[in-house]
Image (spheres, rainbow, N blue to C red):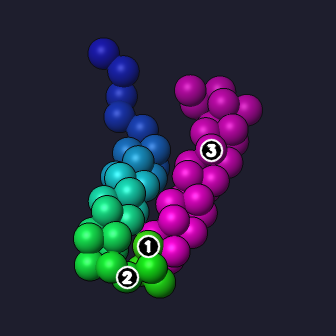
Amino acid sequence: MNKIKWPMLVYSILAAVCIMGIGIAIGEQSMLGAAFCVLGCFVIMGLGFKTKKKMRENGEL
């Protein structure tokens, strides 16, 4: 069985929270909150892909 990649798990949970935040912000009719959640989602997913690339280059994946 493969070991858990903790940084990747944290990034995926944070991205899921941001996606849920988008739905909550739209439900509350807060476009500013939705915009921040979309921006946060892009940043977190970008960091996740960057970390995955580093891990792949180091042979950790």
Q: Amino acid at mark 3?
A: Phe
Q: Is residue 15 above or below residue 58?
A: below
Q: Is residue 34 on the magenta stretch?
A: no
Query: Gap in Å between the C-alphas at discs 2 and 1?
Result: 6 Å
Name the residue beneath numbered marker 3. 49
- Mark number displayed over residue 34: 1
Query: Gap in Å between the C-alphas at discs 3 and 2?
Result: 29 Å
Query: Which element type, helix, strand or loop, lies under badge 3?
Result: helix
- Asked if the residues shown at circle 2 and circle 1 are in contact, with their CB atoms under 8 angstroms apart, the answer is yes
The residue segment tinted magenta is: 35-61
- Mark number displayed over residue 30: 2
Identify the residue shown where x is 42% and y is 38%. Answer: 5
Q: Amino acid at mark 2?
A: Ser
Q: Main secondary structure of the magenta part?
A: helix
* The image quarter in which residue 4 lies: top left
Q: Is residue 53 above or below residue 15?
A: above
